[in-house]
Amino acid sequence: MKPQALGPGDFNLPDAFQKIGDETKKRGMKIIPWMEEDNRARPQIKGFDELYEVDLYGRRTSHHPGGPCLNNPYFRNLLVAQVEDFVRSYDVAGIQRGTERQGPLGNALGAWHHGGDPGHSDPGQTSCFCEYCEAKAAKQGIDFARVKKAYLALEPFVRDGRAGKRPRDGYFVEFWRILLRNPDLLVWEEFWSDSMRETQRLVSTTAKAARPGIPVGYHIWQNISFSPFYRAEQDYHTFMEYADFLKPATYDNPAGERMASFVDSVTQNVFGDLSHQQMLDFEYSVMDLKEKSYAELKGRPAPRFSSDYVYGETKRSVDGVAGSNTRITPGLGINVQEHNSTPESVRDCVEAIFRAGGSGLVLSTAYSAMGPENLSAVGATLRELKLA
């Protein structure tokens, strides 16, 4: 990747930042940029592909669930440079890092909302198996060849499940059998998760070295509300070491459709022995939720989750960082994906966030989609609560 001057049509961030800053200062507002590394297609920048993860068959990933390799030193260099540049070059009041990715086991199983949709996940494309991960694993005493063998053993199970080929002893028994015979599946999952936590710490230490005391926070992918596997890996307690604030995505308005799609995905393999409604009941039990039935969630227009969901997820995150200085500022979804928010639903969710102990909230995700009536409901509720 070679630095080059802006060309015709290129986005001019310094100019845009100046224009935004001029307006926010008039209104007494501060700017905290969201540095996003999520599940979008790979940027068309020369050399950027070499930063990306490598799948089971040695291919570079190009889209979700792949992304930049967390152990690639060139990606880490880029990440450090981006963070330092934002802190030193712009008038920012903090930094927020956003990552909507998970480890290789969850990716191979398609264990995220829309993970089972055609073209969205391929067990042979789970990652990462690059030279940098192999070298790091060797230093930790991890047998890289056994790890690859384990994921190759999992691949036909997932493919057969999606093709409707039920194992002789059922889906869950067969999955557990594969796991018993290939414990390296979990070893590599934790290896990836540890690497993610390393990069998060790197963001915090870099920002604070460039400007001591600057707040640094992290966006928590909404998959934490659907996947018990992902929830187990995203222990809020670990964030207390390096996060000044967290923004868990408590998006009520797309949650119904997303939960239904998660159920659709995992009933194609691990939980294929269950009906969609049985799987949803399992989800509600283990994730401590109580919302609409599967048939209702599949309806159109897609139903929202209730403000009880927002309250519960906020309370869980507040409890998760209790005793620390880490603040919880949940993301309140307003017309995210599904344009079904109303002033009443927004009002109920704002109230739920603060009743659960939230320190603030982030209106998510696109201002242009929210609607003035919904934004007005936020302001009115904050004034009623004497928070504005």
Image: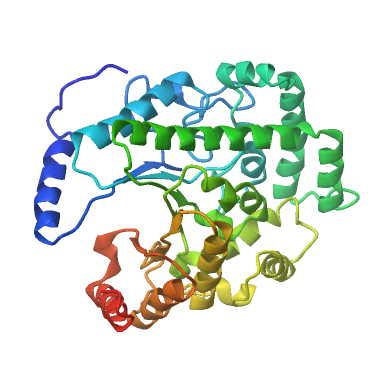
Figure check: 195 above or below 230: above
Q: Is residue 17 left or right of residue 284?
A: left
Q: Nearer the viewer, residue 224 or 2?
A: 224
Q: Residue 15 location in percent, x, y?
A: 11, 39
Q: Say if residue 319 shows up in the picture.
A: yes
**Location of residue 319 by image quarter:** bottom right
Q: Of residues 358 and 175, which is closer to you in this image?
A: 358
Where residue 133 sits in the image (x, y, percent)? 59, 22
Q: Nearer the viewer, residue 119 or 73?
A: 73
Task: Please indicate, yes or no, whether residue 126 appears anywhere in the rendered image.
Answer: no
Q: Is residue 305 above or below residue 273?
A: below
Q: Is residue 45 above or below residue 299?
A: above
Residue shown at the point (15%, 60%) measured from the top left? 28
Q: Position of residue 286 (x, y in %)?
A: 71, 64
136 with respect to 278 (left or right): left
Residue beneath the point at 66% across and 21% down: 137
Q: How far across and down, in percent of the image, does residue 254 sit?
A: 46, 66
User: Residue at (29%, 36%) from the top-left corner?
Assistant: 211
Q: Nearer the viewer, residue 295 or 383?
A: 383
Q: Quadrant of the C terminus?
A: bottom left
Q: Quadrant of the N terminus?
A: top left
Q: How is the image coloured?
A: rainbow
Pick out the residue farthest to the right: 169
The tally of labels here is 0
Q: Is residue 86 left or right of residue 14?
A: right
Give the vertical position of 84 relative to 316 (above or below): above
For the point 9% across and 51% down, the residue is 22
